[in-house]
Amino acid sequence: MLPNARAWLVLGLLAASACKGEAAAPTGPAAKYRVRVQVESIEGTGENARVVLSHEAVEGFKDRDGKAATMPAMMMAFGIAPEVNAGAFNPGTKHEIEFDVVWGREPTIRVTEAKLLPNDTALTLPPR
Ligand SMILES: [Cu+2]
């Protein structure tokens, strides 16, 4: 691509995102959390991939207004950031993950890092 063409493409993308308006804009910087999880299932591929995880209670979770909130141990679906190896999320495996939260983004909650834990790691998960 010619340098000029690339610059116009970048400008076009900026303009397109500016035109989306405030309502669609993600609010504030990403908040990041770490928690230990067990994989339940994984669905979809690429940007649409979602992994269902049972996670331990999340320390220091904040709500949409930045106020202290609670996220107890539960089972829920997470998006997966492109840099994460989704192939490691085999059902039943345990991981320590980092996830980010951007209110207004789809998906709001996304795994950004994952480290495999030994399978005999004892986790405090919701009753099944
Ligand atoms: Cu949760």
Image (tube, rainbow, N blue to C red):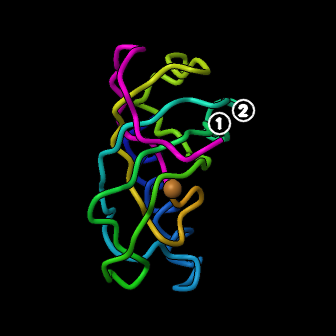
Query: As displayed, is residue 17 above or below residue 44?
Result: below
Amino acid at the residue labelled 1: Ala
Q: Nearer the viewer, residue 44 or 25?
A: 44
Residue 122 lies in the magenta-colored region: yes
Bounds of the magenta segment: 109-128
Query: As displayed, is residue 37 above or below residue 35?
Result: above
How far apart are the alpha carbons under marks 2 and 1?
6 Å
Q: Residue at x 41, y 41 (%)?
A: 124
Q: Residue at x 62, y 47 (%)?
A: 77
Q: Which numbered dot is residue 67?
A: none
- Image position, residue 49 (x, y; %): 65, 36
Image-based side of 73 in relation to 75, left or right: left
> What residue is shown with label 2?
43
- Image position, residue 51 (x, y; %): 60, 36
The residue furthest right is 44
> What residue is shown with label 1?
49
Q: Nearer the viewer, residue 96 or 102?
A: 96
Q: Nearer the viewer, residue 69 or 123?
A: 123
Q: Residue at x 42, y 14 (%)?
A: 119
Q: Residue at x 63, y 31 (%)?
A: 40
Image-based side of 86 in relation to 117, left or right: right
Categorize mark 1 by other alpha carbons within 10 Å: few (<14), some (14-19), many (20+).
some
Q: Which mark is first along the chain, 1 or 2?
A: 2
Secondary structure under tag 2 reads: strand
Query: As displayed, is residue 94 above or below residue 110?
Result: above
The C terminus lies in which quarter of the figure?
A: top right
- Image position, residue 86 (x, y; %): 53, 24
Q: Are marks 2 and 1 in contact (CB under 8 Å)?
A: yes
Amino acid at the residue labelled 2: Glu
Residue 120 lies in the magenta-colored region: yes
- Image position, residue 120 (x, y; %): 39, 15
Image-based side of 83 in relation to 44, left or right: left
